[in-house]
Image (cartoon, helix red, strand yellow):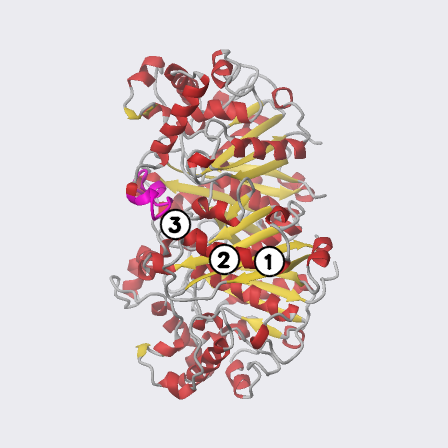
Amino acid sequence: MSRRVAIVAYAQTKHEPDKDSTREFMIQEVATGALRMAGISKADVDTVVNASGDFLDGRTISNMKTVASSGAYLKDESKVEMDGAFAAFYAYTRILTGNHSVALVVGESMASCYPGYIPSILSLDTSFDRPNSFLHEISAAALQATYYMHKYGITESQLAKVAVKNLRNARMNPFALRSIQGISMSTILKSRMLYSPIRELCAYPFTDGACALVLAEESKVWQLTDKPVWIEGVGFCHDSYYLGERKLSECESVALAAKTAYKMAGVKDPKRDIDVFELHENFSYQELMFYEALGLCPKGKGGETLDARVTEVNGQLPVNPSGGALAANPVHATGLIRLCEVAMQIRGESGKHQLKKKVRTGLAHGQHGLCAQDNIVFILRGGAE
Amino acid sequence: MRNIAIVGVGITKHVSKRRDVNIPEFVYEAVKAAIEDADIGIRDIDALVTGNMPGFEGVNCPELWGGGYWGGYKKPMLRITTGGSTGSSVAQGAFYLVASGVFDTVLTMGFEKQSDGATTVGLESAGMSDFVAMRAYGMPELDPAGAIGMFVFQAISYMARTGCTIDYFDRAAAMLRSNAAKNPYAHIQQQVTAEDIADTPMIAYPLRFGHTCPTSDGACAMIVTTKEKAQKMAKKPAWVNGWSSCAEEASIAGLHGAGSINIDPFDQRGCKFAATKAYAMAGIKEPQKEIHLAEPYVPFAHQLFLYPERLLLFNEGESFRQFDQGVMHRDGRLPICPSGGVVSSNAIGAAAMIRIAECALQIMGKAGERQVTRDVHTAVAHGLGGQANFNVVTVLGDKPAGR
C-alpha cells in the first residue's frame, strides 16, 4: 500500500426530523457541496460509492435512481448497503488500487419515510426471532445496556450524563437535529422511557439527512486542498448475530477494528496519540462501552471516565464534540458524518464546536446491525506529512 | 497494483424452492464448496464481501444474520448491492480489496433465496418508485409485469435497428437451455429445440415464456487471492486481469430526476464504456480476436445478441448473423454462455457472480461436461443491474496481466 489517500472535501445537510425535500435533492445538495469545496466538477470524479439501504429507501436497488444526483452518470459506481463509513472504506480501496484517483462517497437516509424500528425487525432470523418479535434495534440495546450496567455497576444517571454531554455539544453544531435549550439531567431523566433503561433522549433520533466526502490520492490531493486529512489507519469487523454468542458487555468487534486501525496508523496509546473521537453511538450506553473497547480506559471503567469529565469538549479526550448520533442519525450517513466531523476538527473548520486545543489526529467510528454488530474505525491525521 | 486470481469456486444447484434450508444454511453450501475447491481453511480467509437483493426474500441485510455461518465471525465483512449486477459488483469489491493490498485472501458470495419471499414484490418496489414514467410508457402501475416490462422495449428496439427477428430469439433460447442441460448447477435443464421454444406462449411482445429466465434459489461463492498465494493454492488459477463498471441514468423510467435524459435501453453505452476500460486494464487491444469465451448477463433471449455486441465482441447488428454460423455454440469459435446463462437459472444476487465463476471454471478447465471444445486463454464476464443502467465487466485470463 504505497499510495496514500486523503479526505479533501466534505458536505452535510442540516439534519431534520421531516425534511421538505427528496432523497435525490439531499444527495445532490451534499454531492455538489463537496465537489464545490474541492473546486472540481463531476467530470473530475472517477468513482462514486453510494451508501443507502433498500429497506430504508423502500425501493429495490436504492442506488438505481440516485445515479444522476450523485454525479455518477457514466462513472464506475457502486453501493455499500451498510453505514457510510464502510462505503468510505470501499472508496479508499478503489483509490489504493490505482484504478481511480478521485472518489465521491455519499450516504443518505430519510427516516420520515420508513416505519421506525421495523427495518431492524426485518433483519432478524426469519424462523424464530422475527415471528416471536422480542427483538429489534432498541429492545436488543436495552438487553445489552442492562447487562452492561449490571456487570460493571453503571447507573442510569451515567447513561443520562452521556446524553447531557452530547446534546450540550449538539447545541453548538448547526447541522444537528436535536437542539434543546438548557439541557440538564432532569430533561433527560424526564424523557419518555422506551425500553428500560433506554429513554427517548438516550436513543438516537429518527433523522432525514445526507453527507458526502471527496477522497483523493496523494498526487491529486494538493490540487484539491491545502488542508488534506489523511486516512492513516482503518479496521473493521463483524461479530456474531446471536447476542448470546457475544460477550455482550464488551464490544469485541470495536476492539478488533480499533486494533487493526491503530496498528496501521502507528497509534501506540490512543489516549496520548489521538486528539478527538467521533463515535457512532446509537444509544448513550454504547458510548461508554466504546471508551473501553477503544482502549481509552480499562474494562468496566467507562462510567468513571465519563464522571472524570475527560471526554467533555474541553477535556483531555473529547468524544463527540458534534453531539454524535444522539444529535442526528441519518442511517447510512452517520459514520460518514463522523469522518466529516473529524476532518472539520483537524482542518479547524468546526465553527462553534471547534475544540480549543490543536487537533492533529482523530478517530471516527461507524456501526451497522443490532447492538453494534459490525464496526469500523478510522484514524485520520492532518498536516503536510 | 497487485495481480489477483480466483482460486476457488462454489455454486449451488439452482432450484425453484429450497425448503429444507434457511438463507444462511443455503449460502453456506456455496461457501463450503468454494473453500474445498481452493483446498484451504476458513482461517485462511482475511475478509468477506457479500451481497444480495434483500427485497426478493424480505430480509434486510441478511449477512448480519448469516455472516457467522459463512466464516465471517470476528472478520471484516462488506456488503455491496447493485440490483441484478449485485454478484459482479460484490466480486469486484473483493477484487479491489485484494488488489489494493488491504487483504490477501477474500471470500466473496452472492445469493438469492427467492422462494423465501415474493419476486414480484422485489421487482415492483423497484418499478413503483417511478410510476409516472411507467404510465407514460403505457405500463400499468399496479402490474408492471416484472423485469420483462422493461426488457421488451430493449428487444423491440434491437429488432427494429438490426433486422433481427423472433425466430432468432427462439434459437438463442434453445441453445442456452441445451447448454444448461449439461450444467449440473442450472435450474432449467432442458434439451429443447427452437420449435419447442416457439410453442411457448407470448408473455409480452416480442418475448415468449421460453425466452425468459426462471426465479431461482441459488448461491455462488469464490475465493480471490494474491499472485503469491494463488500459485500455492491452485494448479491453474483464473487471473482477474481487468474489471470496470459503469452507471447510467435508469432507462425507460428515467424521465425525472436531476437533469436526466431518456435513454434507449438498446443503447447500453455503459456496457461499452466498462468493457473498453476492462480490456485496457487487461492489456487486450482487439477483443474480437483476443477473447475466447463470454458469459454475458442474459436473462432474456434477445440479450444473447445485444450484449456480446456491447462487449465489443461483434460489430453492432452482426451477432445474430454470426450465431447462424455456429460461432456462439459450445463448439464454436467464441462460445457465449456455455453455462446456459441467466435464461436457465436466475438467482438475482448470485447470477452475475456466476458469470465470473463460470469464466473462471472454463479457464481452469474445471467446467466438466460444459467445458467448451476450444482452448480458453481469456474470457469476459458481464453483469447487468438496475433498470439496465448498471453494467459490470470483468476480464479473466490464464496468465496474470503484465503490470
Alpha-carbon span between mark 1 and mark 2: 11 Å
Residue at position x 34%, y 61% in the image: B119
Q: Which residue is mark 2?
A: B29
Please name the predominant secondary structure of the magenta segment in the image: loop
B255 in the magenta segment: no
Residue A107: percent from left, percent from top? 46, 42
Query: What amino acid type is highlighted by mark number 1?
Result: Glu
Can residue A76 be spotted in the picture?
A: no
Range shown magenta: A114-131
Do the residues bearing badges 2 and 3 touch, measured as CB atoms within 8 Å? no
Looking at marks 1 and 2 on the same chain, the residue that comes earlier in the sequence is marked by 2
Do the residues bearing badges 1 and 3 touch, measured as CB atoms within 8 Å? no
Residue at position x 32%, y 44% in the image: A130
Q: Which residue is mark 1?
A: B36
Please name whichever residue, B112 or A314, is drawn nearer the observer in this view of the structure. B112
Indicate which label's residue lies in the foreground, 1 or 3.
Answer: 1
Residue A175: percent from left, percent from top? 42, 30
Please name whichever residue, A331 or B61, is drawn nearer the observer in this view of the structure. B61
- The numbered disc on residue B199 is none
Residue B134: percent from left, percent from top? 30, 63
- The numbered disc on residue A54 is 3
Indicate which label's residue lies in the foreground, 2 or 3.
Answer: 2
Within 10 angstroms of label 1, few (less than 14), some, or many (20 or more) residues? some
Q: Quadrant of residue B136 in the image? A: bottom left
Within 10 angstroms of label 2, few (less than 14), some, or many (20 or more) residues? many
Residue B256 is left or right of residue A267, and the answer is left
A130 in the magenta segment: yes
